[in-house]
Image: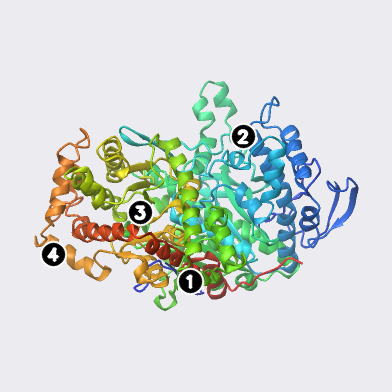
Amino acid sequence: MATTASPPLQLATASRPHASSSGGGGVGGVLLAGGSGGGVAPGRGRGGMQRRVSARSVASDRDVQGSVSPAEGLPSVLNSIGSSAIASNIKHHAEFTPLFSPEHLSPLKAYHATAKSVLDALLINWNATYDYYNKMNVKQAYYLSMEFLQGRALTNAIGNLEITGEYAEALKQLGQNLEDVASQEPDAALGNGGLGRLASCFLDSLATLNYPAWGYGLRYKYGLFKQIITKDGQEEIAENWLEMGYPWEVVRNDISYPVKFFGKVIEGTDGRKHWIGGENIKAVAHDVPIPGYKTRTTNNLRLWSTTVPAQDFDLGAFNSGDHTKAYEAHLNAEKICHILYPGDESLEGKVLRLKQQYTLCSASLQDIIARFESRAGESLNWEDFPSKVAVQMNDTHPTLCIPELMRILMDVKGLSWSEAWSITERTVAYTNHTVLPEALEKWSLDIMQKLLPRHVEIIETIDEEMWPTKFQNKTNGVTPRRWIRFCNPELSALISKWIGSDDWVLNTDKLAELKKFADNEDLHSEWRAAKKANKMKVVSLIREKTGYIVSPDAMFDVQVKRIHEYKRQLLNILGIVYRYKKMKEMSAEERVKSFVPRVCIFGGKAFATYIQAKRIVKFITDVAATVNHDSDIGDLLKVVFVPDYNVSVAEALIPASELSQHISTAGMEASGTSNMKFAMNGCILIGTLDGANVEIREEVGEENFFLFGAEAHEIAGLRKERAQGKFVPDPRFEEVKEFVRSGVFGTYNYDELMGSLEGNEGYGRADYFLVGKDFPSYIECQEKVDKAYRDQKLWTRMSILNTAGSSKFSSDRTIHEYAKDIWDISPVILP
């Protein structure tokens, strides 16, 4: 769950459920018979101006000239377009939007040409949306986040535009397959995990529900990292998502803003404070369209890249042979957007992270203010700012928005402290998504004073930003478009058939209608067939990614999320090791009788400097190497670590999953959203009473959720008992640790990993995350899982009821609550 505070300076916290543009932004273009979607200059303040266009109708081969208002455009074009015309448009882009050699239409070339073709269609709605927001001068929300984990755009865009069939047929005419073409798209490396995925779900819901809103982020050149699994565990290499170009973005070279670092503060003769000197860069806008589902609304995600003007290149130094010095200013600017979450062990790393966060805040606020001034025109009144602008800070990263908005209003616009503060507290809101102290960032005063001297003055003047009465809870959600409608077409078709319509995609409350069919044998049969079809896809994915061959008839048991001790992948793999040990102690007949066949799937990245998390990855892969090659065990147990887990992998794994593990130490997960995706896709959860598990269990029914482990209110006491030496480990826990240390999983020394679970105190020891405490409860709960799975009628019923009970967890519901309770914005439907 995420908690958000109501205005002013709305604050939000994520806690356990019950303790819990610019200046410019339009994009020009129409869908041309062989056109690229061209461009109307995206200048500031065009309001509801009509655009003069000249295009060729692909349907009737006639010239169309005249004014296209926002009411016209996409519907008239798409309603008259067929697959042959789309094929022609794709072919045109393959030939005349050249990114590749002309010899043949490879799947990669076809992807880029197809993406440009879809972008042609999006441009019309994108422009119309921007123009209409300007014309109506509506209040707009701006969502600032260091992460947007978008996933592939092609299938999502054509799905939202309801032209998937047409594009599939068009590509078939060109000798291509839509699935193969779509698979060429790399995941945009703009996020890490739940925080970024939630931000992207929110953007989808905002557009689908017709809310005027933009996202702001950074355009990372390399993102987090690409994960490679070797015999030594996880290795990191730079992401290459931009290497072949990103066809969904439009670079706004005319929209850039200065961002300053270092320097000093002086007081001018006008009585204002002036921040002078220091290091100056510029942030350049790159826009990505965010189409809504079954609506013309197409909102914007604006990403900033960083650079310096050409004159900052030291030509003299270069010609004298000092090439490094010549390029120094460019390197310092560009490295700001190289990597998501650069390591901050060093002083340089800390400064770079702070630069990233300030760049996002400063560039975005300058852009927001420019758009406000443009719309206001001669009637500009700063008191109107909160009635036209709502700024949402996604977690701690963009919190410099508060002093930065104050700085701009006072130092640049000339407002008094009281005027600026009144505006700021009515404009800015904050959501906190974590309860981990280390995730609530802290910056040393020394670094802040050097890098952002004016902001330190402002922060010190703000006595307190805390209004406990203003904090409120918002349960997170996921978009049902990407996370069931598009990623699980088999199950989606089944739901629509039994409910009688596909209205549930926009109104997930209708999923509850499945409850009345929970015991229907025909539905059971179709439900299991849909699951089996998805499992077959994952069998292929696992073979492709790891070389392992797994049986689709085994239970697919999945834990995919960031690798962290509190998420307890270690508990999961130790449970698997215990299961393996018990199997080895039995005869073949006893094994089959005692255990349900399982494929245990892991995925997730350990942060590059998080040594213990990387040890866990290494351990999982070592267990997999042993178990998967044990002929005695065969298909009764397989362990798979899927490398480089991302949105696209999730879109394959989640529909195929039958058991999903959400087993964090109680009280440590603020929410989680993958658990919502799994439940929505008919997967049954095993988990603790932590984060959104609490509400999911309430919604789907306690009997349809496998619960184990200590509860949040017990954790502090259990840790205190441990420190006092009172913890007595279960013999089964000692047995499994000894088995690991026996060397059965290879020569790697696991003393550090196992040692973290031992002792009564000390950093990295004393089992802070209570793996040993919850281990007996966990393996006993897993026995209940086996028993339930053997009864496929019972299991299928539980699966259906998980989907039927997941309606609350749509991000549409979350966004409606934000819009009403926090931002005070209303839907704006294009005419």
Q: Residues within 10 Å of mark 3 (few under 14, many from 20)?
A: few
Quadrant in the rendering for residue 444: bottom left
Which circle's residue, 2 or 4, is located before the other in the chain?
2
* Residue 232 screen position, x and y as percent: 30, 33
Q: Nearer the viewer, mark 2 or mark 4?
A: 2
Q: How many marks?
A: 4
Give the residue type that dot 2 points to.
Leu
Which circle's residue, 1 or 3, is located before the other in the chain?
3
| Front residue (pair 479, 36) | 479
Distance (Cα) linking label 1 and label 2: 43 Å
Distance (Cα) linking label 1 and label 3: 54 Å
Q: Secondary structure at mark 3?
A: loop
Q: Nearer the viewer, mark 1 or mark 4?
A: 1
* Residue 800 screen position, x and y as percent: 45, 64
Q: Which mark is residue 444?
A: 3
Cβ atoms under marks 1 and 2 closer than 8 Å: no
Distance (Cα) linking label 3 and label 4: 34 Å
Q: Nearer the viewer, mark 1 or mark 3?
A: 1
State left or right for residue 729 relative to residue 447: left
The residue drawn where x is 39% and y is 62% is 793
Q: Which mark is residue 515?
A: 1
Distance (Cα) linking label 2 and label 4: 59 Å
- Look at mark 4 in the image and give the residue it sits on: 721
Q: Nearer the viewer, mark 2 or mark 3?
A: 2
Tell me: residue 599, above or below residue 749: below
Give the residue type that dot 1 points to.
Lys
The residue drawn where x is 42% and y is 61% is 796
Cβ atoms under marks 1 and 4 closer than 8 Å: no
- Look at mark 2 in the image and give the residue it sits on: 108
Distance (Cα) linking label 1 and label 4: 45 Å
